[in-house]
Image (tube, rainbow, N blue to C red):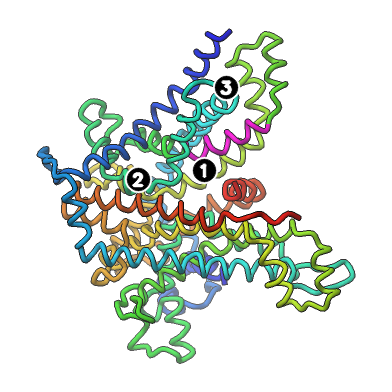
Amino acid sequence: MRHGVARFVTGFLALPVALYLFYVVWPFVQAAGYSLTDWGGYSNSQRFVGLDNYVRLLSDELIRKAFWHNVFFLVTVPLFTIALALFLAFLLNVGGREDRAGIRGVFGSALYKVIFFFPQVLSLVVIAVMWQQIYRTDSQGLINGLLIKIGLVDADNPIAFTADPEPFLGIPAVLWWLLLIAVWSGAGFYMVLFSAAMQSIPKDIYEAAILDGAGRFDTFFRVTLPLLRDTISVAWVYLGFIALDMYALVFVMTPSQGGPNHASEIFASVIQFNAFQKGQFGYACAIAVALAIFTILLAAVQLRITRRERIEF
Amino acid sequence: MVIYPLLWVVMSALKTDSEVIREPLSLLPESLQWDNFARAWSAGIDSFFLNTLLVLVFSVTLTMLLGSMAAYALARYEFRGNRLIYWMFLSGLTLPIYLAAVPLFKGVYNMNVVFPLLGPNKHLTLILVYVAWSLSFTVFFMHSFFRTLPDSIAEAAMVDGASHTRTFFSVMLPMAKPGLISIGIFNVLGQWNQWYLPTLLMQSVSGEPKHQVIAQGLIELSVNQGYKSDWSGLFAGVTMAMLPVLIVYIVFQRQVQSGLTAGVSK
């Protein structure tokens, strides 16, 4: 019997584990190894250079830029997505009329939930190609066309969107335009998530609040928000990962994949640039390891901050 | 606000090129130009589309099979190394793919020498890489699903004389069907939308038959053709790339939402 179990377990695990080791784990291990060499990628000469790549990384102007851009997305993507999703979820679930049956969402909320979810199932590439058309810098773009028509934008001087290196509030404008896409594509999913959480809040809590004379504003900030804290913190962690992974948008939408003039460079695009355009595999691997360490630290910090006592209801 | 851009793309796909340029903002086309789709289809979307479909059929089937086997073995049998293997699969969820990109590319490139079928630009490579990278979430998801199934059923089957393997395939796997459907759709959506891995492993080689997938095809149509391209054709291409996932999503809406939220709220 014991023998049978061992053979069964080995048989079931052999193939998946082998595949996973070969295509996922081994590349990770190798990357860590290559990061200590000066490997160019196209030759076979690899010299062990110790931590040289990491030292160089600290003074690399491009990396410093990419780092701050990543931080920008890390702060803004979760913040705006969660705020918008919460607002929509609140509208759909408790924003409607109050009647004798209690509190309900606005009319047609089930349909809205399906539609708002759409962008979540589309790939970032489809979304990016689509938004490329929306952001076109002539009168045929959706936004420019609209603004020109109502006279807000001069037809000879349309908004440049992702080709715009000018800063807005100290941040290159291109980053704000990318942020808008990320928030647009993510808000629907988190709205559905928050909706589910809101629906699990017992109705009597709301009824009690209303009896006590709480308005809609009070109900949201005093009742809904505190009870959703768990879900929100999970969403925050997930959006953190998404914020680090804006590469598809940068790749499709920005001039020379990180432009204009490196204004939208992020870690991933710097890795790609160094590895495949400058042919510095060793250095690219060091950047990637730095990104991985950054990600893991971030996850640890986020889990630490968000792990608090649960509210039972 | 959410739906308008989507609708705008679909509607523009049905306009003539001059109409797109003249009246970009109007939603309703003057007359429906279905041949935009035919043109985009024969301009290359056909092979991108069929490549994606071919890769997807094999990769999703294999992901589901291998993922549930591993998850089942890990969830129901105690053995040395169980936790280690489980954590190994799980770690793939957090590490950024860009870290593995360079070695993965070189590894696949070198494989070409020994096994040409596993080299770059081969669908088999893409299938195996998709499977490997999808295993993390699939094992994680199915592991928690198998844990919810009562032990007594597996034991009863064993008492009746079924082998471990038979118990899995004819008793436990059918019972896991709701979970399998959720994670299956999730994998279909995820792998249809894959872009980074194919970009890495499927370089466009001139003179060779196109082997790239739909996401790359769109980029080719939009980025590489620059500003002189066929607008309504591009819109038609985007529409064709999103239709399959939207249909899958609308049909299996409940499973997608429960599957995704189950993954998030763990």
* Badge number at residue B77: 3
- Dots 2, 3 in contact, CB < 8 A: no
Q: Dividing the picture into quarters, in which one does residue A206 lie?
A: bottom right
Classify mark 3: helix, strand or loop: loop
Left/right of residue B161 with respect to residue B2 in the rendered view: right
Residue A75, image x, y percentages: 45, 67
Location of residue A60 with respect to B249 vertically, above or below: below
Q: Decide which of tag 1 and tag 2 comes sooner along the chain.
A: 1
* Distance (Cα) linking label 1 and label 3: 29 Å
Tags 2 and 3 both on a single chain = yes
Q: Can residue B14 be seen in the rendering of this structure?
A: no
Which residue occupies the foreground of this view, A16 or B112? A16
Residue position for label 1: B188
Q: Decide which of tag 2 and tag 3 comes sooner along the chain.
A: 3
Main secondary structure found in the magenta portion: helix
Amino acid on which disc 1 is placed: Val
Q: Residues within 10 Å of mark 1 (few under 14, many from 20)?
A: some
Mark 1 vs mark 3: in front = 3
Q: Decide which of tag 1 and tag 3 comes sooner along the chain.
A: 3
Residue B23, image x, y percentages: 46, 79
Which chain letter matches label 2? B
- Magenta-colored stretch includes residue B97: no
Residue A185, image x, y percentages: 51, 63
Q: Which residues are magenta?
A: B135-148
Amino acid on which disc 2 is placed: Pro
Location of residue A210 with respect to A235 vertically, above or below: below
* Distance (Cα) linking label 1 and label 2: 15 Å
Classify mark 1: helix, strand or loop: helix
Which residue occupies the foreground of this view, B239 or A182? A182
Tags 1 and 2 both on a single chain = yes
Amino acid on which disc 3 is placed: Tyr
* Badge number at residue B198: 2
